Amino acid sequence: MSDASTTVGVIGLGAMGAPMASNLARAGLLAAVWNRTTSKADVFFAEFGVVRASDPADLARRCDVVLTCVSADGDLLDVIDALLPGLSAGKIVVDTSTVQPATAIEIAQRLEKLGCGFLDAPVSGGVEGAKQGTLAIMVGGAAATLERARPVLNAIGKRIAHMGPAGNGQATKAVNQIMCAGINHAVTEALAFAEDQGLPLDKVIDVVSGGAAGNWFLEKRGPTMVRWEFNPGFKLALHYKDLAICKAIAEQRGVILPVVEMTLEQYRRLIDAGYGDEDISALYREKRKLFDNE
Ligand code: NAP
């Protein structure tokens, strides 16, 4: 499979899938798209002239590599079921969704029986990274499958790491999501404190970003959260789903992770209050409440 001959189909044109598909189209690799809500596929047809597959199996028949980016485990398993009639030996499925390692292992075993390759290839870098084609990609699966799929991953990401067998990409993503939860707490809590102190928040974000506490989330989401703008980005309900995965893995080891527990609790409150489709920086709402004591 070379750069020139590889054809890719993308399933799931959401906040992450759409910009990844755009980059694949610009690299000359995108052959077809399918999205449950068909209007999103129509946008791709209008912009790039790519085929709108009639269903996932139709897409699989048209492509060497199928790249999936859907919400959660059950959604991915449904899509894999729908892909199966169109898959044949030699094809590769690359999943960029965030799901349980066990789900990735189950899918890898199912596809192996058909002679198909599977990579769990969850991504990090946000919508910005997806748009710029600079995602970090954590890959589980056979090294040979990764080498065949590498031209596809090169079109959407910058740092591509082979983490080991199937499931290890997702396990690495779980590490990433625990860290993101801690960073979200640190940034939202510190900026809520800064606001309460009456400091000029734009200057706080700028100067702190240049020092030891500087980080991606502060730079990208700090300026919007202090304006109470919480457009995703990364939906809070999706991070909740990821942290539930982390909690389940830790529980298998008999361990309770404080950052994971605290974040699940506060996200649950926000979801119940109707903020699940907001960006994860909506945690700022909870942190500001701590100062509402007048
Ligand atoms: P999103 O904007 O909500 O998009 C979800 C996509 O999945 C949509 O295209 C949706 O189709 C499709 N989908 C959901 N359930 C489906 C089902 N049962 N069958 C078929 N298609 C289905 O979410 P996103 O932010 O792109 O996230 C997608 C995945 O990437 C998630 O696993 C998330 O955890 C992960 N992720 C997100 C980010 C981020 O910053 N946003 C970063 C890294 C990883 P419809 O259009 O029909 O709803």
Image (cartoon, rainbow, N blue to C red):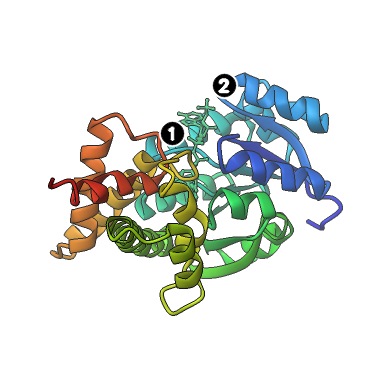
Q: Which of marks 1 and 2 is in front?
A: 2
Is 17 positioned to the left or the right of 251 in the image?
A: right
Q: What element carries label 2?
A: loop
Q: Which residue lies furthest to the bottom in this view?
A: 212
Residue position marked by numbered label 2 in the rendering: 37
Q: Where does residue 198 sit, x and y in percent of width and height? A: 32, 58
Residue positioned 82% across, 58% down in the render:
2
Is 287 positioned to the left or the right of 168 in the image?
A: left
Label at residue 215:
none
Mark 2 Cβ and ligand 1 under 8 Å apart: yes
- State whether residue 122 is above or below residue 91: below
Residue positioned 60% across, 52% down in the render:
128
Mark 1 Cβ and ligand 1 under 8 Å apart: yes
Regarding residue 245, the answer to whether it shows in the image is yes
Label at residue 75:
1
Residue positioned 26% across, 38% down in the render:
270
Judging depth in this view, the residue of 101 and 108 nearest the camera is 101
The amino acid beneath tag 2 is Thr
The amino acid beneath tag 1 is Asp
